[in-house]
Image (cartoon, rainbow, N blue to C red):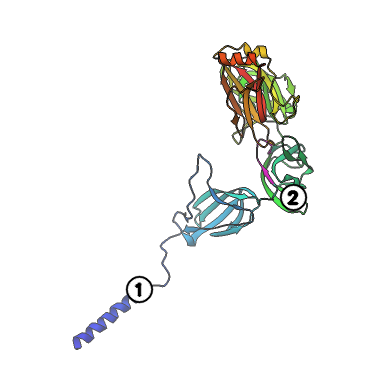
């Protein structure tokens, strides 16, 4: 009995020892000198260099997220939207207007060590919302000049705010090609990127992503390809300020045509290859080139031995009535087309009309007999056709050559 009593006392003492060592709260071993880490959520990897989308919801929803970080006791979390701090702490819940937003989350320790996560927040419109989409270069604008937005339900738009500053002359326009809302960019704004809000008759505001304001001459299309000794057409904004274009070491100062939106010149007689192209304005500033979402002061142009049969900017829509010059492209004479040698490559360079509901192109004879299958597209490009004797005979029998379809411009036709 005495032995049992001693054993019980020993067990009680042993249990008391372990009870005294336990705690109700977990004990953190992290220190202020540890590297910060965002443990949860895990953001997807970039795809082809592009940030992943980490949230996708309608504008009547909210963006909410909760982070787990370490060392939690020594780390400050900041939430940035488009580079602007909007919240601190490990949790966020926020409403957004329609648009695409750049999210960056930083986690910084008291000793200054930092890490971050980045992603895209995509906020979608409701079905009846005015919604401006991006279809071309219409979001590169110049202060004090006209600009436009394409999209849906734009007839509801009565006002436009550019970075909070009201635009003027807001007008809804309907054409045979489509509808858009036109406005004058506030002249007092400086260069930079600005968020846009569309305003309806009741004063309700809707997100419309961003525009880029520039006061300089900027070429947005046409500068990356040319044919030696042929007309070369570039488009952009403020191009009436351009004084010269230089390819390799050849400077061109005389232009065939020059307006605010178009610059037409004769390409220097250079051998086939790639060359650096630059430009200067009358005030001595560099001409800017917009390519792949970036702005640069020089660009690489590919000059080929293709012979230009026609160059310009001719709209095509088979919805036009018979007799309308824009129902087809028929500006290359029949005798030119039937004189082409078999084996030659005919190339049609085209660009889109942003307001058109769809974009379709087909090369055909003068009787609308297709020479190739129709193509559908959403961006400018080039359509190539290898000329055969059968094609030449067909064009000779059926009144020559046409480009038909809808919603695009013929910019250049070449033969090689």
Is residue 34 in view? yes
Q: Nearer the viewer, residue 74 or 395?
A: 395
Eye-nearest disc, 1 or 2: 2
Residue placed under numbered mark 2 in the picture: 199
Specify which label sits upstream in the sequence, 1 or 2: 1
Q: CA distance from mark 1 to mark 2?
A: 65 Å
Q: Nearer the viewer, residue 47 or 251?
A: 47
In which quarter of the view is residue 385 placed? Answer: top right
Q: Quadrant of the N terminus?
A: bottom left
Does dot 1 land on a helix, a strand or a loop? helix
* Horizontal arrangement in the rendering, residue 45 relative to residue 212 (left or right): left
Q: Position of residue 155 (x, y in %)?
A: 75, 45
Q: Which residues are magenta?
A: 131-139
Q: Which mark is residue 21?
A: 1
Q: Position of residue 161 (x, y in %)?
A: 74, 47
In which quarter of the view is residue 384 placed? Answer: top right
């Amino acid at each position: 009995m005495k032995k049992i009593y001693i054993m019980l006392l020993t067990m009680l003492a042993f249990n008391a020892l372990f009870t005294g060592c336990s705690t109700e709260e977990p004990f953190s071993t992290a220190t202020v000198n540890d590297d910060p880490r965002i443990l949860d959520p895990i953001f997807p990897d970039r795809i082809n260099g592009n940030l992943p989308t980490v949230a996708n919801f309608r504008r009547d929803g909210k963006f909410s997220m909760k982070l787990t970080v370490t060392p939690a006791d020594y780390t400050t979390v900041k939430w940035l939207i488009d580079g602007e701090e909007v919240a601190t702490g490990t949790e966020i819940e926020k409403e957004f207007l329609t648009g695409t937003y750049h999210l960056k989350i930083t986690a910084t320790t008291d000793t200054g060590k930092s890490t971050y996560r980045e992603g895209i927040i995509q906020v979608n419109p409701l079905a009846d919302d005015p919604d401006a989409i991006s279809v071309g270069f219409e979001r590169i604008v110049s202060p004090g000049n006209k600009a436009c937005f394409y999209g849906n339900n734009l007839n509801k738009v009565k006002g436009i705010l550019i970075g909070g500053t009201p635009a003027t002359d807001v007008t809804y326009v309907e054409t045979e090609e489509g509808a858009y809302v036109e406005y004058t960019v506030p002249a007092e704004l400086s260069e930079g990127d600005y968020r846009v809000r569309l305003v309806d008759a009741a004063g309700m505001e809707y997100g419309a992503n961003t525009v880029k304001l520039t006061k300089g001459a900027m070429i947005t299309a046409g500068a990356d390809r040319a044919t030696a000794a042929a007309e070369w057409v570039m488009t952009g904004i403020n191009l009436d300020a351009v004084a010269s274009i230089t390819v390799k070491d050849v400077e061109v100062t005389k232009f065939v045509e020059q307006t605010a939106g178009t610059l037409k010149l004769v390409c220097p007689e250079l051998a086939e290859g790639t060359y650096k192209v630059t430009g200067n304005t009358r005030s001595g500033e560099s001409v800017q080139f917009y390519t792949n979402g970036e702005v640069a002061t020089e660009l690489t142009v590919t000059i080929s031995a293709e012979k230009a049969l026609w160059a310009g900017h001719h709209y095509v829509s088979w919805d036009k009535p018979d007799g309308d010059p824009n129902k087809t492209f028929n500006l290359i004479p029949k005798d030119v087309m039937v004189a082409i040698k078999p084996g030659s490559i005919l190339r049609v360079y085209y660009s889109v009309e942003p307001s058109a509901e769809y974009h379709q192109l087909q090369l055909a004879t003068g009787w609308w007999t297709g020479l190739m299958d129709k193509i559908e597209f959403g961006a400018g490009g080039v359509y190539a056709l290898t000329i055969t004797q059968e094609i030449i005979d067909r064009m000779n029998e059926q009144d020559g050559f046409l480009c038909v379809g809808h919603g695009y411009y013929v910019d250049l036709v070449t033969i090689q």
